[in-house]
Image: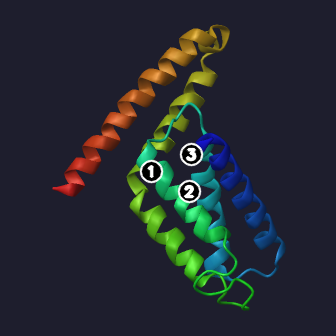
Amino acid sequence: MRHAEESEIIEAIGNVLEEIIDEEPLPDFVAKRIPQLDAVIRMLQDAEWNLPISERERLLAMFVYFDNPENLVPDHIPDIGYLDDIIVIELVIHELHHEREVYNDLCDYRDACEKNSQALQDSAVRRNRIDKKRQQLHQQMRNDSQKIDM
């Protein structure tokens, strides 16, 4: 059931983003964060990344708040309706800075694997390489998190 709820939240946030993008002109503080939201949605949906539960829950909670049109500052108020949403997004994205950087490392690694013709011929080899790299990067995330907590 949890996976179904997750996919519903992600679908809903995608719909909200489409609605926001259709509202032209967008305030700069909103337009600037749309690509960041797209990036964290990709990170959340990436089966090969397998984002840890605690980070998944933070992102999903942010999306639930963002999807609520009647949150602290109602979204329909011109120019400032998304201000509270942006603050929440900014806080979560800043908090997940290390995770996003490490995820980008995995994406770069996958791109490099795709360019290697041998990896394309054997999907099991590719999957093993990606799994090993993901495990290394997840360990790096945990180590970075421990350093920050100290």
SS label for mark 2:
helix
Query: Of the residues shown, which amino acid type is indicated by label 2?
Result: Leu
Q: Earlier in the sequence, mark 3 or mark 2?
A: 3
Using the image as rendered, state which of residue 93 and residue 1 is in the foreground: 1
Using the image as rendered, state which of residue 112 and residue 4 is in the foreground: 4
Q: Which residue is mark 3?
A: 43
Instruction: Give x and y (percent) for residue 13.
Output: 70, 60
Q: Earlier in the sequence, mark 2 or mark 1?
A: 1
SS label for mark 3:
helix
Q: Which residue is mark 2?
A: 60
Residue at the spot x=70%, y=83% of the render?
Answer: 75
Quadrant assignment, res 80: bottom right
Q: Which residue is mark 1?
A: 55
Q: Circles 3 and 2: CB distance less than 8 Å?
A: no
SS label for mark 1:
helix
Callout 2 crowding tier (Cα within 10 Å): few <14, some 14–19, many ≥20: many
Left or right of 40 in this view: 129? left
Q: CA distance from mark 3 to mark 2?
A: 12 Å
Query: Of the residues shown, which amino acid type is indicated by label 1?
Result: Glu
Quadrant assignment, res 20: bottom right
Give the quarter of the figure containing the C terminus.
bottom left
